[in-house]
Image: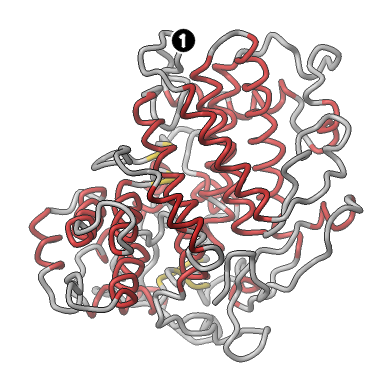
Amino acid sequence: MKSAKYFIGCFLLVILVLGLNTGCRKSFLNINDNPNAPSTVDVSVALPAAEAAIAHAMGNDMQIMGCIWSQYWTQSPAASQYKVLEQYSPPSTNFDNVWRNFYVDGLQNLSFIITKATAQNKKQYVACAKIMEAYAYQMLTDNFGDIPFTNALQVDQTLTPTYDHQQVVYNGILKLLNDAIALIDPKDPTAPSGDDLLLGGDMSKWGRFANTMKLRVYLRLTGIDPATSEAGVRSLAGLSFLGSGENVQINYTSAGGNTNPLYSSTVALGGTPNLLASNTAMGYLLSNNDSRVTVFYSAALTGGYNGLNQGNYNSTVNASSVSYPSPQVGANSGDPNSATAPVKLMTDNESYFLQAEAATRGWLNAGQQQTLYNSGVRASYADFGLADTSALSYLAQPAIAFPTAGSLQNQIQAIITQKWISMCGTQGDEAWIEWRRTTYPNFFVPSAVSNIGAGRFPRIMLYPSTEVTRNPNMPGQHFIYDKVWWDIN
């Protein structure tokens, strides 16, 4: 069995072998004729390349944007790299890398795997690739709105694909997940093993990942299509979801080329500490006696934990008196331990909070919402090596305990707020998505340097400049305060 370190190291090599760059997207799938994409490339090499590409997008650019707009992090006065994100006015070029990571480096590889593994009767590779396709397309459509889907990877249309409405994409995501689940067989000897960076070829976990993905997809529709949302969640009764310790993540090493992508990017910038703690998240942690402050952030050199108000980068602040993201979330450029922080695509605590919301709505495991809520908090503590007694003490506080006597909205607010703080620094994009869906937490403050008008927040990512300039089928650029299809708040 080859190590994860080996396969992460192969990532750049695979991109070169398959010819996955903007110039050769059109001929990528025509592997029998394209000398840059030889048919001898094995699916066991393409799978980790695709997983690494998607993790790179989620753990770097989307992590930064998500964590700033979820008010975990803010721009440091000592630098300027992310001022445009705090101003809510990033240029469309800021989204080029994300788009390429997903479509060119991720989805093209996954499409190759499905084609080749189907021909070789390697059904478990097909299942993994379809689940990852579903994940990638959901992240794309939840962040950009309408996206290329139906013909996104077709040979003659990959340079100028048409865009599909989000509802079409969502229907396609569910089909991908259902098709994958039908293929999963934990006893199949041809299943991936060490070449699967996310779950080590454990197909039972892949099945639970797919089920949890479906739960996430259906709950995303609570506002725009409550009937479909309810029916979909109810259809999951009796299925298993990701449980304690079952995080879908890539682990990194301290070796060059195998390090956490966010840490790698900060090193490339010279190690400048661009990001520091936002007072929004820091204040919540401190006011609620949450010991996770010690793992989400590093203590200030002068002692204690101190943040900065969102967008307050023009202030004069002593660098030694503020807290920076901890190495456990990969964003502390001054601490080489950041190199080994994992990138988490989906976690056990997210799974529990999704189930808690479904139970609160009475659609799945009704009556278990408090237990599932508590499990989400406890799983978050456990993920960072904190004692369960600390989690229980945190949950015992009246302000944190599940509001059993509260209204439905009181309970949903509690669940999403705990999901938000549990994702601090690790699933920034997902936290931002859930804030847009629910408006929880309800105590976000506009950036001090916002350029988009009073009371407005970023609610959608801009289409990349590569689409604006090259694809006549792009539906037109939107404003950053516009909304995706399911965002009705």
Q: Quadrant of the C terminus?
A: bottom right
Q: Is residue 297 visible?
A: no
User: In the image, what residue occupies the spot 73% across and 73% down?
Assistant: 479
x and y percentages locating residue 1 in the rendered image: 40, 12
Q: Nearer the viewer, residue 136 or 259?
A: 136
Most distant residue in the bottom direction: 454
**In this rendering, position of residue 197 left or right of residue 456:** left
x and y percentages locating residue 346 in the rendered image: 41, 46
Q: Is residue 100 above or below residue 92?
A: above
x and y percentages locating residue 426 in the rendered image: 41, 54
Q: Is residue 384 above or below residue 193?
A: below
x and y percentages locating residue 296 in the rendered image: 32, 61
Q: Is residue 265 above or below residue 410?
A: above
Amino acid on which the number 1 mark rests in the picture: Thr
Disc 1: CA contacts within 10 A as few (<14), some (14-19) or many (>=20): some
Name the element at disc 1: loop
Q: Nearer the viewer, residue 367 or 281?
A: 367
Q: Count every numbered label the image shows and give the total.
A: 1
Q: Nearer the viewer, residue 389 or 117?
A: 117
User: In the image, what residue occupies the spot 58% across and 65% down?
Assistant: 486
**In this rendering, position of residue 203 left or right of residue 114:** left
Q: Is residue 282 above or below residue 12?
A: below
User: In the image, what residue occupies the spot 55% across and 87% down?
Assistant: 448
User: In the image, what residue occupies the spot 35% across and 53% down?
Assistant: 350
Residue 61 occupies which quadrant of the picture?
A: bottom right
**In this rendering, position of residue 145 left or right of residue 343:** right
Residue 408 occupies which quadrant of the picture?
A: bottom left
Which residue is disc 1 drawn over? 190
Q: Is residue 97 visible?
A: yes
**In this rendering, position of residue 452 left or right of residue 348:** right
